[in-house]
Image: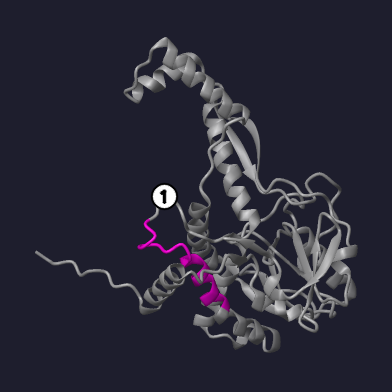
Amino acid sequence: MTKRKKRREPREFLALLESARRDEVGGSAPRKHHLVPASYLRRWAEDGKIRVTHVDKGKSHFSPPEKAARETDYYRLESPEIDTDAVPPLLFEKMLGKIEEFSAGIVEVLTKQGPDALSPPQRAQFSFFLALQITRGHSFRVANRLMVRDYFQLKYEGVTPDGVRQMLMEAGMPSTAENVRTAYAQIQEIVTGDVFFEPQDPSIVAQSGSVAAEMGGHIFARNWYTFRTKPILVTCDEPVIMIGGPPNSRRERAGVATAGVIIFPLGPSALLAMFLPHARPRGPLELDGIETAEINREIVTSSSRWAFERPSRKVTQNMPVPPPVPPFMREGPYPVQGDENRLVFRTFHPTRWANTVPPPWPVKRWWG
């Protein structure tokens, strides 16, 4: 009989665990968590401040990067179902800090030297960092809640009292008339949205890490280029932006595996653009004023709430954007050809252009 070896956790992970436990017990746990790394936002700072614009209110203020885009206990892993000794509440926040610390240097290399200067391990690490920027923010979290709510509404839509009786019997519960009436009434509250199921925040936080690990592989495989821009480039609280490109719909957000280009602002004068593996950009690796303005529009309209720029600029404050839309929508049902008893639904992530006339895709030469 072969004896299975006990799994050994990497030394770096054990150090993060210990640090998270120590801060929690010692009462020094940080309560304010950054939705966007402060080290990243510093790239837009002048005299220690950046301009923070609430996109849908059109109002802006100046803030130190360290105090911008923060929420209390946003990444805290705390739930009655979680053993706080095995999984300290601060573990994810500690992990993000470690990844951000490493990635700050990569951003500098990409800005000054371009992607070819990265080693494969650096590129892999930064791909994971970029994927985490997609899954750590508000859009991912709200979409997950809506998807779970929608699943249960769809599951119970059209259920009859006889169907409720059958469900009770299958669950081994008494199917008395009173139980059927009570259960049916509860199901109707779910269908109407008066009562809903949604995952706890710690569950979504944990899922964001596992989803990012899968996304990172798609990002790694793309063709990376650093574009120089006019010194007016902005960023936002969802800084990794998928641009579908033709023939995709302007009204729907493309996926990491399908977007024609994925962009990430590196600073006020540099943009990382990642093309599909078979695609190459036309023209110089430099965006003119019009192209930079088009990219700024994509960035601001991709924000959940906040956009950021140099204090001396007012691009984010003056740019009109369509109103926000739910980050998850469902269409249908549609009949299945050849099977009259089956129906299918289509789900997608809309963009702010969903209910208005969208502009052309940015940087026309990218889509030749």
- Left or right of 328 on screen, residue 360: right
As drawn, which residue projects farthest toward the left?
1
Q: Position of residue 27 (x, y in %)?
A: 48, 69
Residue 199 seen in render:
yes
Few, some or many residues within 10 Å of mark 1 (<14, 14–19, 20+): few
Give the residue drawn at x 56%, y 35%: 196
Give the residue drawn at x 73%, y 80%: 43
Q: Examine the structure image and report whether residue 60 is included in the region drawn in magenta.
A: no
Q: Position of residue 35 (x, y in %)?
A: 64, 65
Magenta range? 83-100
Q: Examine the structure image and report whether residue 96 is included in the region drawn in magenta.
A: yes
The C terminus, quarter of image: bottom right
On the image, which quarter does residue 291 sit in?
Answer: bottom right
Determine whether 178 is above or below 75 in the image. above
Q: Position of residue 323 (x, y in %)?
A: 81, 49
On the image, which quarter does residue 362 sit in?
Answer: bottom right
Disc 1 residue type?
Pro
- Foreground residue, 364 or 267? 267
Determine whether 332 is above or below 224 in the image. above
- Left or right of 187 on screen, residue 238: right
Determine whether 187 is above or below 273 in the image. above
Q: How is the image coloured?
A: one colour
- Foreground residue, 95 or 144? 95
Residue 271 seen in render:
no
- Foreground residue, 11 or 31? 31
Quick one: SS at disc 1?
A: loop
Determine whether 268 is above or below 337 in the image. below
As drawn, which residue projects farthest toward the front?
27
The N terminus, quarter of image: bottom left
Q: Which residue is mark 1?
A: 80
Q: Position of residue 70 (x, y in %)?
A: 66, 65
Give the residue drawn at x 51%, y 60%: 76
